[in-house]
Amino acid sequence: MSVNVSGKNIDVGDAFKTSVTKEVTNLINKYIGTDLDAHVSVEKDHKLFNVEIRLRIASGFVVRTDGVSNDPYKAVSDAVSRLEERVRRHKRRLKDQKRRTHWEAESISATGYVIKRENSQQGEEEHLIIAEQERLILDMSVSEAVMKMDLTRLPVTMFKNSENGRINVVYKRSDGHIGWIDYTE
């Protein structure tokens, strides 16, 4: 397992890296027990420290959590406790649903695009930044897609419905509930 600790607007020292690595490694060994990769990003924003932890679990999901505090160790502890809660919830759902383990084998490749308007100086043209990323559309049930959306903290998840073979979308609605779109031709 590798835990990568990096800093933005801050120099991350060896003692801090060791402490963070130990906390994340203990959590992973306690709940998951496999060789996984984790990335911890620490950013200083004025007097606050923002910590984001990304953990790729065996099913291919990336679990993301964050913590904010005026103390970097406290911010890491907050992020690790949120990560522990999400990993426990994920394991409980796996046990309850007796999920399939062939998600990666049955998937469709798709390309995702992000378009961002870059601010320009007065008198200059605005430029669009387009980011292109290859994504997998996994074969899963609606409840599995909702769980993936919850773990990854994304507002929307596209998937191939394992029950009917059609492309579906689940998304977070503005009222806090979850919407589901089942595409039919």
Image (cartoon, rainbow, N blue to C red):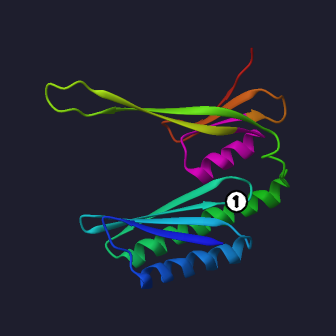
* 67 with respect to 92 (left or right): left
Please state the horizontal and vertical placement of residue 16, each as a whole percent of the image: 43, 81
Going 49% across and 68% down the picture, which residue do you hit?
79
Where are the magenta residues, as a range?
A: 137-159
* 122 with respect to 134 (left or right): left
Q: On screen, 185 above or below 41?
A: above
Q: On screen, 36 above or below 156?
A: below
The C terminus lies in quadrant: top right
The amino acid sitting under disc 1 is: His
Question: Could you classify mark 1 by the number of other residues whose Cα lies within 10 Å: few (under 14), some (14-19), or many (20 or more)?
Answer: some
Q: Which of 6 and 67 is in front in this view?
A: 6
Residue extending furthest toward the left:
122
Please state the horizontal and vertical placement of residue 48, each as a whole percent of the image: 30, 67
Please state the horizontal and vertical placement of residue 85, each as a whole percent of the image: 61, 66
The residue carrying mark 1 is: 90
In the figure, residue 140 lies in which quadrant? top right
Residue extending furthest toward the top:
185
Asked if residue 153 lies in the magenta stretch, the reply is yes
Q: Which of 116 and 65 is in front in this view?
A: 116
Q: On screen, 137 above or below 1?
A: above
Please state the horizontal and vertical placement of residue 172, each as a whole percent of the image: 55, 39
Label 1 sits on a secondary structure element that is helix
Going 84% across and 52% down the picture, which residue do you hit?
101
Q: On screen, 20 above or below 172?
A: below
